Amino acid sequence: MSVFVHATVDLDERAEVSAGCKIWHYSQIREFSRLGEGCIIGRNAYIGAGVVLGRNCKVQNHALVYEPAVLEDGVFIGPAAVLTNDEFPRAVNPDLTIKSAEEWKPVGVTVREGASVGARAVCVAPLVIGRWSTVAAGAVVTRDVPDFALVAGVPARRIGWMGRQGHRLVQTETGKFRCPVDGSLYEEVGTDMLKEIEAR
């Protein structure tokens, strides 16, 4: 599979771009970042230094993925979403001298397999977005998101469960949760965990 990189892309020669990747207009791919096979990077997106993307990730237009973020296989980052990296942001020290890169420690967002982060959502590092979960558009995520969770709001709270198909799960009469698309069955474990019990 070939790689497509638009002529306007700022691609550092030390970045690793795998087969099948497509990188669109005006995006910046920083040094030592790694893009797995089949990734798509939209217009004006930013991939920070050392950021790691698994296979078949999609980072949409104007999204900002700051180092040291890690995106596992099949992750979706929506338009203008932001994955931050500074837990205590300041431009200057108390004496108003400019802070250098050595004076702060970057912290990252990890997005697990198959998860989706909606348009204009902000994920405030450090945190983990669980497998196959969904962060709603415009949400501000300030704590870890469980696998299969649907979170929304400011700050984000869990409002439901999502299946692998990307649709909200429907609770059955027995208290289990079923995917309306493929019929896969899930059940709650405790108050904030979900597990698959019958995949389709």
Image: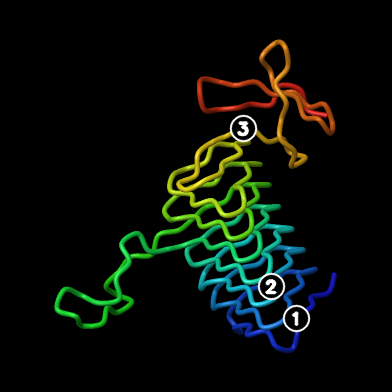
Q: Secondary structure at mark 2?
A: strand
Give the mark nearer the N terminus: 2 vs 1.
Answer: 1
Q: Quadrant of the N terminus?
A: bottom right
Q: Quadrant of the C terminus?
A: top right
| Along the viewing direction, whichever of 24 and 5 lies nearer the viewer | 24
Cα separation between marks 3 and 1? 38 Å
Residues marked 3 and 1 touching at CB (< 8 Å): no
Compared with 179, 15 (above or below) is below
Locate residue 27 relative to residue 98 in the image: left or right: right
Mark number displayed over residue 5: 1
Label 2 or label 3, whichever lies nearer to me, is: 3
Cα separation between marks 2 and 3? 36 Å
Amino acid at pointer 3: Gly
Mark number displayed over residue 17: 2
Residues marked 2 and 1 touching at CB (< 8 Å): yes
Give the mark nearer the N terminus: 2 vs 3.
Answer: 2
Q: Residue at x 74, y 42 (%)?
A: 166
Q: Position of residue 102 (x, y in %)?
A: 30, 75
Q: Position of residue 192 (x, y in %)?
A: 52, 27
Give the mark nearer the N terminus: 3 vs 1.
Answer: 1
Q: Secondary structure at mark 1?
A: strand
Amino acid at pointer 2: Val
Q: How many marks?
A: 3
- Using a 10 Å C-alpha cutoff, classify the residue at mark 3 as few (fewer than 14 neighbours), some (14 to 19) or many (20 or more): some
Q: Residue furthest top?
A: 174
